[in-house]
Image: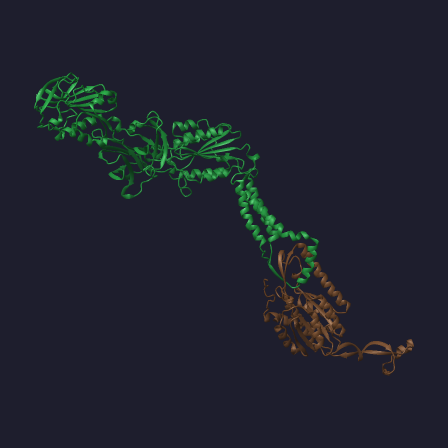
Chain colours: A brown, B green
Amino acid sequence: MEQPASPLREIPADALFDESFLGHLGALTLVAQRIVSGRQRGERKTTKTGTGIEFADHRPYTDGDDIRNVDWGALARLNQVLVRQYEEDEDLPIHLVCDGSASMSTGDGSKYVHARRIVAALAYIGLANLDRVGVATASASHYTALPPTRGRAQIFRVLDFLRDAPHGGGTDITAVARRLIAEARKPGVSVIVSDFYDLAGAARALGMLRHRKHQVVCIQVLDRREFEPSQLPLRGDVALVDAESGARNDLTISEGALRRFRDAHEQFCRELSTRCRAQGIPYFRVDVRDDLPDVILRILRGGGVLR
Amino acid sequence: MSLLSLSWSTAAALFGGLAVPLVALYLLKERRPVAVVPFVELWLKVLHAERARQPWLRLRRLRSLLWQLLMLAALVLALANPSFDRWTAHPRHYVAVIDASASMLAPSSDPQRWDTRLDEALAATREEVTRLGARDRAALIIAGSTVSVETNFGPINELVEATYRPVAATGSGSLADAVALARAMTANAPNRSWLRVFSDDAPHDSLAAAAWSGCDVPSTRCSWSRVGGDSENVAITAFAARRSHADPALIDLSAEVHNFSGAPVTASLRVASGRMPLRTVPLDLPAEGSERVSLRGLAAQQERFTATLHGAEGSPIPGVAYDDVAFAVVGPRARIRIAKIADRQNLFLDAVLLALDAEIDLVSMSPEEARRAPQLLAGFDLVVLDASDDAAPLPLPKTTAIFFHPYAVEDRAFPVPMRRLIRRPRISARPIDDPLVKGVVFKDVNISEATSFALDATDRPLLKHFDDAIAIARAHEDGEWIIIGFDPIRSDLPLRAAFPMIVSRVVERLRPPRENVAPRLQAGRRATVHLRDLDLDLDDGVAVEIVDDEETLITRAASREQQIDVTLPAPGIYKLVVDGQARSHLAVMGHGREESDLRAREDRTTRLEDRARGSDRAALPPWSATTAPPSVALLVLVLLSLLVEWRWFHQRRTV
């Protein structure tokens, strides 16, 4: 079988995180601080109620409850003994996972570049907020991780890690989720940056993470040239080679097939979005031609990564 | 529909030959462009549904193959040049007559584009017929040494193809016959016809002018187009050879060289006999002038002569080359038919006749045989009678005869009476100016005995013993008798040069004057050759072959009343072959004065324009789509199909 050319096009290291990108990081940090202003640094609220100072809910009084938490006002108004619950402040780590499969590197490799820049930007913002940030790149064939670390100065380790991260292999988000769960001592914020060209595996992985109390954020990075009919350079008889498996398929592609492929791709993305919403997972679709600061701000405004 | 360029079977074979590899290539695995995609699972899902919905997509490759086979068929059909019978049912006719006389080898009007006027004429014809439509039919007539119809109202491409074939331009051409033929071809055409003549001159002889006169009629448009420009030339305009009257063994040659230019020219004329050079004559030709060269008494080994013109010191002379050479032959020496009637062996007489063997046909017979068939003697030019013992009367031929000692038997009857018998006579006198004995030495001839003759008024004494004529010549209606009154054997005359000289003089006097006449022909002109001039005597219907120096048969003619009619295409010297033997030669001149004068002459041009009414070439209809050949439409169809096929099937880009 004819072997396709190497799907990944190496991006020069300097081009991946150039000065323009680093300049954007500083500006993004300021904006992010405004978005999350009013909160104490290092604080991240968990879903658990505890001894925090921020009111969370009421519940009926039970034996053994601290009498100081009884809401006397409510007792007077409602004639019910209710206990105030407070959110528990907890320092949760941010796990940033970048899909390093071969499907991220097709074309000119811009998807993988864009994904790594998003991860780097989020990591920088997290480190600047004194969050503990861990970074990983993963595929079906490899998983490399930078353990959670804290402090702005660690950004260079993160950049070096992303720059030198291996890539290739298939997309297996389930395996990524399993690895993430296994290595995290306690649940945190898990940001998965991928093209999610493994819909069944992605749904299963997101479920697993949610089940383990991870706060998951999905960022789907796409290259419009991969599914837009007007831009796809495919006509007639072609041999389609899967970037991840290398499997060759001789197909005849017509204009109608291109249109249907675009519709199917849109359907796939909508289904991913629907499944994320169903589980309360923030979902962002990013095109490689989108401006990186806009993407980061959209993610930050959407919430989920920083609070 | 019919195919004009290929037969149906050839077209089918061509299609089959091209279709087989095409199909084979399709059967082989098609090389597809490879595209690496990130999500092939989705592609498969979509295309699976597509295939399920449109099964005809599976036949897409077959459709492409059929499409290409259709294009191939259209291409082969276009190459075959199809023609619809309905289109050509009533075609319009175009006839091009191209002058192929020798002067058409002169430089063209634009030497950068065409070498010769002939090339220019052919190119002009090609250019003109491209204006015709597919339904028109064209004929090409080459007026060379003979009229040749190269294409007879075929499609245009046939004529164009014919103009690329080599054309031999020699002689003065046959324009008159060609024009007459072209007019006959267009006379009955139902639609409009065009008759074009391309020549370097207007009709310059009466025949051509007569053929051209009245050509332009409502149904036929005639025009005479002049090709070629002005050109200087130096030419041999005349060359002739003959045997010398004084001595037929010698040759007289004459030539004329003309300078058709405005500047003096220095040249030389070289004359050769066969390959043996004879003379080189320097020439100083004045502008617009000529010089005659006369060479007399040349001793030549062969009967064929060539004159060539050369520039001074080897430099070229102006003008064309075809008229820088000329050919001539002299007639063969006649063979004299001699009958020897003798009743004894006369070695001296036999030796004399043997010396003449190359020029005579000798028949020996006895007096008895001659008497039995006296009519036989009439067929001989000369009869030699040497009967010493036979007492019977001698046969008396009505032709020229030599009698040796007619009164060897005294009482033999003989028309010239004997005067007396002379013992040991002496030759005391002879006529000084008599051609038979002039210059012959008879001094101290010893003769044992002789008889003298009684002369009448017409007798002419040749040798005298004082008053007795012992040798006389008697003239009669068909010749003369030379009567020697003594027996040469009984004298010492045979030991002297006088004896063979007398016999030889008699033979020479018998030679007919026609041997000085050699027929001269002009290339491309039909001529009648009199076989007698070539010393040939052939019965009617005998085949005469004319071959060139390389024994290539040029033409064949049958004799009729001692004549043959021949047309020889190119200048040169040819052999006449009868029954496999070369019997004589013919010289053919390649040109005349008219063909060598390459200058543009206003009078001719003016006359040309007068005759070529409406000679503008725009009279021809322009090419139009309605008259385009179907092959053009087919080629356009193939081209469009290729574009469509490429656009919709083969256009691919790799990712």
Q: Nearer the viewer, residue A291 or B630?
A: B630
Image quadrant in which the C terminus of chain B is located: bottom right
Residue B271, by quadrant, is: top left
Residue B626: image location, x then y, percent: 57, 38
Counting labels gives 0
Name the side, left or right, on which A267 lies relative to B153: right
Residue B654, by quadrant, is: bottom right
At a point 18% along the width and 30% down the height, the residue shown is B350
Q: Nearer the viewer, residue B579 or A142?
A: B579
Residue B226: image location, x then y, percent: 42, 35
At a point 57% along the width and 44% down the height, the residue shown is B74
Q: Nearer the viewer, residue B40 or A25?
A: B40
Name the side, left or right, on which B70 lies relative to B274: right
Whether residue B610 is visible to the viewer of this picture, yes or no, is: no
Residue B485: image location, x then y, percent: 13, 22
Image quadrant in which the N terminus of chain B is located: top right
Furthest toward the right, the residue is: A79
Residue A6: image location, x then y, percent: 59, 66
Residue B25, placed above or below residue B147? below
Name the side, left or right, on which A14 lies relative to A301: left
Residue B31, placed above or below residue B114? below
Whether residue B244 is visible to the viewer of this picture, yes or no, is: yes
Name the side, left or right, on which B208 lies relative to B54: left
Q: Nearer the viewer, residue A262 or B624?
A: A262
